Image (spheres, rainbow, N blue to C red):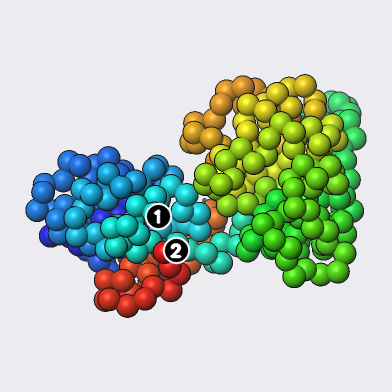
């Protein structure tokens, strides 16, 4: 009987490694746990979890021998960590190994919106260029004043890249960070938005940051502002964002994450001034392989009674 359950859309190689290393039982989702025979549920010691469906105490209670939830991803807002801790369950995540990919994507999205990639690609692909259809001029990206909301591991990588684009860097974090000279700290997100041209959201998801990017923050960003979100959909008040994009209160948005994803609010998709992506921040062969290896190292450690490499609790 399998001691490990694997849940999520793993790559073929990660799925094969979970099977090879742990004889993991693959399930389509958390809901399928309830359908397992009781002796199988009792045998489970660890869940290799990938995804964003809420993993709460009631699900944990279906697995009375559970010792570990090894999350495939740095963000673990889907997992009720307090409920896990109360049950003696270790939670782990996969930090650091995805920083480059997520930061690369954030900067790419920011440039894509400054330079109006979507309109330009359509112009070339459709043959409009050949027919002499002229494009409106885009905006310059280098040298803009950019605010990074959340200067954690990924936020810092984004800011370092933006510094290479000669941007003026502003950031908001719970506390002032040790940064290169000239980076400006703002305690309040509205103050941050007021001080910059564009805003990149890199703060962790979860209840503490729910709706952090409010209508007030968007208004403070202003009609030339672009907002980029590579964090979690929950961080932005999506109703306020839709209103701001419709009214022109901000210029554009580039979003890799959404409330209720993988469904996207049709009102957002109807807007010409958003660049939507299907949560691909860490989705490269190299990074997903590193995330999978770290997830399995954490599982191996906990099942052997040792401390995991990257514990959450
Ligand atoms: C997901 C992510 O892990 O790391 C995170 O927090 O959001 C992503 O890298 C990935 O989408 C798999 O669920």
Indicate whether 1 appears above or below 248: below
Q: Residues within 10 Å of mark 1 (few under 14, many from 20)?
A: many
Residue 116 in the image: state x and y as whole percent: 79, 37
Closer to the camera, 310 or 83?
Answer: 83
Per the rendering, the mark at residue 312 is: 2
Horizontally, is 23 left or right of 215 in the view? left
Distance CA(mark 1)–CA(mark 2): 8 Å
Closer to the camera, 146 or 2?
Answer: 146
Is residue 80 something that shows in the picture? yes
Distance from mark 2 CB to nearest ligand 1 atom below 8 Å: no
Q: Residue at x 45, y 69 (%)?
A: 310
Residue contact between numbered discs 1 and 2, judged by CB atoms under 8 Å: yes
Residue 30 in the image: state x and y as whole percent: 30, 44
Horizontally, is 96 left or right of 180 in the view? left
Q: Residue at x 38, y 61 (%)?
A: 91
Closer to the camera, 178 or 143?
Answer: 178
Is residue 105 something that shows in the picture? no
Which residue position holds label 1?
A: 81
């Amino acid at each position: 009987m399998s001691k490990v359950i694997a849940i999520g859309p793993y790559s073929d190689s990660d799925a094969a490694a979970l099977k090879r290393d742990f004889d993991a039982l693959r399930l389509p989702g958390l809901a399928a746990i309830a359908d397992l025979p009781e002796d199988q549920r009792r045998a489970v010691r660890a869940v290799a979890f990938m995804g964003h469906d809420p993993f709460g105490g009631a699900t944990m209670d279906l697995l009375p021998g559970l010792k570990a939830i090894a999350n495939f991803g740095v963000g673990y807002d889907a997992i009720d960590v307090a409920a896990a801790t109360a049950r003696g369950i270790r939670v782990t995540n996969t930090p650091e190994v995805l920083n480059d990919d997520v930061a690369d994507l954030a900067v790419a999205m920011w440039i894509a919106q400054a330079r109006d990639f979507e309109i330009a690609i359509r112009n070339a692909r459709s043959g409009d260029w050949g027919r002499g259809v002229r494009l409106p001029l885009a905006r310059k990206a280098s040298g803009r004043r950019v605010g990074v909301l959340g200067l954690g591991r990924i936020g810092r990588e984004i800011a370092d890249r933006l510094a290479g684009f000669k941007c003026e860097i502003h950031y908001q974090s719970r506390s002032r960070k040790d940064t290169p000279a000239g980076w400006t700290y703002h305690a309040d997100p509205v103050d941050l938005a007021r001080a910059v041209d564009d805003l990149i959201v890199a703060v962790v998801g979860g209840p503490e940051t729910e709706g952090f990017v409010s209508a007030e923050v968007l208004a403070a960003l202003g009609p030339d502002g672009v907002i980029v979100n590579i964090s979690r959909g929950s961080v932005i008040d999506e109703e306020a964002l839709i209103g701001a994009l419709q009214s022109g209160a901000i210029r554009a948005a580039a979003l890799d994450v959404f409330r209720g994803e993988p469904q996207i609010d049709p009102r957002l998709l109807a807007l010409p001034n958003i660049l939507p992506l299907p949560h691909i921040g860490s989705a490269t062969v190299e990074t997903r392989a590193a995330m999978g290896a770290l997830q399995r190292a954490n599982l191996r450690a906990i099942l052997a009674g040792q401390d995991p490499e990257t514990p959450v609790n």
